Each structure stands twice: as structure tokens, then as C-alpha cells.
Image: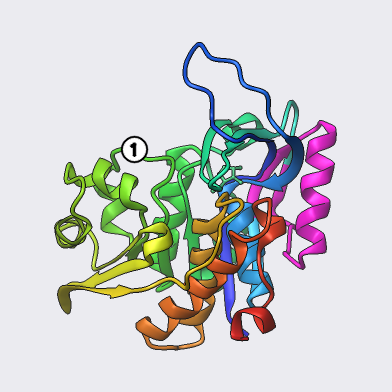
Amino acid sequence: MTRIAVLGSTNMDLVAYVTTAPRSGETVTGQEFRTAPGGKGANQAVAAARAGADVAMIGAVGTDDFGDQLRTALEHAGVDIDLLRTTEGPSGTAHIVVDGDGGNAIVVIPGANGSLTSLSHADRALIAEAQSLLLQLELPMSAVLAGAETARRNGVRTILTPAPAQPLPCELLAVTDLLVPNEHEAATLTGVSGDPERAARALLADVPEVVITLGARGCLYASRAQPEPVAVLAPPVTAVDTTGAGDTFVGTLAVALGEGRPMTDALTWASAAAALSVQRPGAAASMPYRAEIDA
Ligand code: RIB
């Protein structure tokens, strides 16, 4: 079984469903409110576990009720949480508005995630034994960098989701094997907007392989060995909630690559998983199981 380590965030998602998201200064009435486990790290861990991998998560929750709920949700998904710390104070929260087209806008308050600034000996040992390490940017950069460097030293594939979008230190890019930004994140990193093919080629100056996710339009893959980007289409579906779709894609992609599948097959399988997830509400809750993805 593919063994995947995730170093990342856990958040409780506080989600308001509305027809049209409010602009600054505007108040709107929504249809529904839900709380649901999320966080880019935890979402990727759940996606990979449901897709059939053996997954362990390094992260932190708080001492509030959300912390207990986030722990339980990961445990129920079959994720190993031996290295999930509990730190004094609130858990991370994400304040999400989902509009009538399934699009979202998110504010993340890091809470306990912000306490994870360095890695323990046990964290490093767990990373060293994995096939892939999944990283995002909702933990302090010092921890993300320590994780990626540990992975590189031990020949573990690093897969980085550069979200929330921000410029990346050269040291992190130097130890990233596969970068998976969305269009907005790719534009932040390259200064190229509206031209994902050019952005993908530009990113190859920093990392050996890149996948730019394009939502309903699928994704683009480019590598130093094959710099002309290849497009993989997403199955056409009606989205009700796109929250966590990118995380579903990355978690599933990591499983397929860990199983040795060729990149285009892996991207097609990951796109199917993401297309399934957007048809259901919630982030981690919406993620499909392996049999559904295969079907
Ligand atoms: O990628 C989606 C996730 O971003 C949500 O679950 C939310 O917690 C934020 O971290």
C-alpha cells in the first residue's frame, strides 16, 4: 500500500451557503450554515486515505471542542494521528462563503496550526519512511521547509500545494518535486495571469514538475522532461460546493503516483475524484472512496 505523510493544517470549516457572496459593506441572507472538518492538510490526508493509501498526519489541533471533533474525523477516515499535537488554545477555523455556483471565498484563522513551527525526531522519522510528503502553506513556513528538506534528504517525493497564495522562498522550491497551484496561485508565483500554459513553463525554472489546476477546465501538466504543457480535461459536472476540490485532487494524485501509474492516468483519476467531490457539500466530507473514483 502507498504510504503517504501529510504535514499540514486541520481547521473546522464554518460554511455559509448563499446565492451571491456579499461585497464589502453588504449584508446578504444565506440559505444554510454548516460546520465540517477541513483544513488543507487534513483534507489531503482524508482524500489519500479514501483513495486507498496508508496515511499519517503531522499537525496540531487546539484544546477546544473543535479540536476533539477534528481528531475524531481524521481517526474515522483511517488517518494515523499519533503525531497530531494538541496545543493550548483554539483550533484553526476557516470562515467560508459558498455561492450559488459552488464557488467559495475563505478566511483562515490558524489557531493551533500556528504553533507548529518545528519538527520533532518522530515527525522526521515518519516523513523519512513515506513514499510522498504532502505539504501546503497553512502551517508556519519553518515547519513546511523542515518537512520538505527532511523528505528530500530521504528520497521522499515532495508534493506542494502553494495555498494560501504567497511568494515562496527559494529554499522551499529547491526541495519541491511536484508543485500543484491553482490558476490564482500560479499567477501569484509567476506574475503571469490569464495564461496558465505560460505560467506552467515559467514554474519549471523553479521545480521539475508542475500541475496547474483549472477547476471545471481540468488541469495542465508540464515537466522539465516535457516542457510543452499537456491538458487533462475534467469530467463535466454540476458543482454545488468546490471547497476542498483541489485537496481531493492532490491527495488522490499522490496515491496514483505512489502506485507507479503514469502521470496522465494519475491526473485523469485525480480529476475524476475532484469532480465527484464538488457535487457534494463540505470539504473532507465530500471526498470519494476508491471504488467511486474507479467507477
Ligand atoms: O482547501 C479547502 C480548505 O481551505 C478548507 O477546508 C479550509 O479549511 C481551508 O483550509
Above or below, 120 against 156 in this view is above
Residue 81, image x and y in percent?
Answer: 74, 57
Label 1, on which residue? 166
Figure quadrant of the N terminus? bottom right
> Alpha-carbon neighbours of circle 1 within 10 Å: few (<14), some, or many (≥20)?
few
Asked whether, in this view, residue 255 is left or right of residue 34, the answer is left
Residue 95, image x and y in percent?
Answer: 62, 31
Picture quarter with ligand 1:
top right
Of 13 and 46, the residue lying toward us: 13
Give residue 69's quadrant in the image: top right
Residue at 57%, 49% in the rendered image: 243
Residue 53 lies in the magenta-colored region: no
Instruction: Determine the secondary structure under disc 1.
Output: loop
Residue stretch rendered in magenta on the structure: 58-85
Residue 286, image x and y in percent?
Answer: 68, 60
Of 50 and 105, the residue lying toward us: 105
Indicate if the residue with disc 1 has its beta carbon within 8 Å of ligand 1. no
Tally the marks.
1
Residue at 25%, 45% in the rendered image: 187
Q: Amino acid at mark 1?
A: Gln
Above or below, 254 against 213 in this view is below
Asked whether, in this view, residue 51 is left or right of residue 62, the answer is left
Of 170 and 79, the residue lying toward us: 79
Residue 204, image x and y in percent?
Answer: 18, 62
Residue 75 lies in the magenta-colored region: yes
